[in-house]
Image (tube, grey):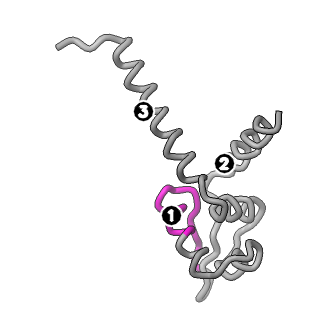
Amino acid sequence: MIVSEEDISIINEEQNMEDTSNLFLLLGNVTRIKIIYALRNENKTVSDLAHITNCSQSLISKQLKILRDKDIVDFKQKSKYRQYYLTDKNIISALNELVINMLI
């Protein structure tokens, strides 16, 4: 079976569409968006994030696990606390662009 360039292009485009769809599903949770924005400038602990977002620490931990599994956030161990950070700050630009385009 010979696969054409057009077939490869469609497959790659479908994969990009699926990746985009998965990102929207990931960002379809207000708490996760709050966490991402809270981490935009500096690392924070679960306690910090709970205070900033007005959510329970258990909810923050659960959402951080989801974001870590998708490589959106990671942490550095500082003594007995984990300092969470964004792995790629470009997600803030992407979120801002979405918000701007929704307002137009």
Quadrant of the rendered structure where residue 44 is?
Answer: bottom right
Badge 3 or badge 1: first in the primary sequence: 3
Give the distance between the C-alpha atoms of the residues marked 3 and 1, in whole angstroms. 21 Å
- Secondary structure under badge 3? helix
Badge 2 or badge 3: first in the primary sequence: 3
Residue 101 falls inside the magenta stretch = no
**Dot label at residue 86:** none
The image position of residue 63, as x and y in percent, is 56, 68
The image position of residue 17, as x and y in percent, is 49, 33
Is the residue 76 above or below the residue 9 in the image? below
Give the distance between the C-alpha atoms of the residues marked 2 and 3, in whole angstroms. 19 Å
- Secondary structure under badge 2? helix
Judge from the rendering whether residue 38 lies leftward or rightward of residue 58; answer left or right.
right
Is the residue 87 above or below the residue 74 in the image? above
Q: 83 or 100: which is nearer to us? A: 100
Residue 72 falls inside the magenta stretch = yes
| Residue drawn at 67 percent across, 58 percent down | 33
Q: Do the residues under discs 2 and 1 have CB atoms within 8 angstroms?
A: no
Amino acid at pointer 2: Ile
- State the extent of the magenta-drawn residues as a range: 63-77
| Residue drawn at 58 percent across, 70 percent down | 75
The image position of residue 11, as x and y in percent, is 37, 25
Image quarter in which the C terminus is found: top right
**Dot label at residue 66:** 1
Badge 2 or badge 1: first in the primary sequence: 1
Q: Residues within 10 Å of mark 3 (few under 14, many from 20)?
A: few
Residue under numbered circle 3: 15
Disc nearest the viewer among 2 and 1: 1
Q: Residue furthest left?
A: 1
Residue under numbered circle 2: 91
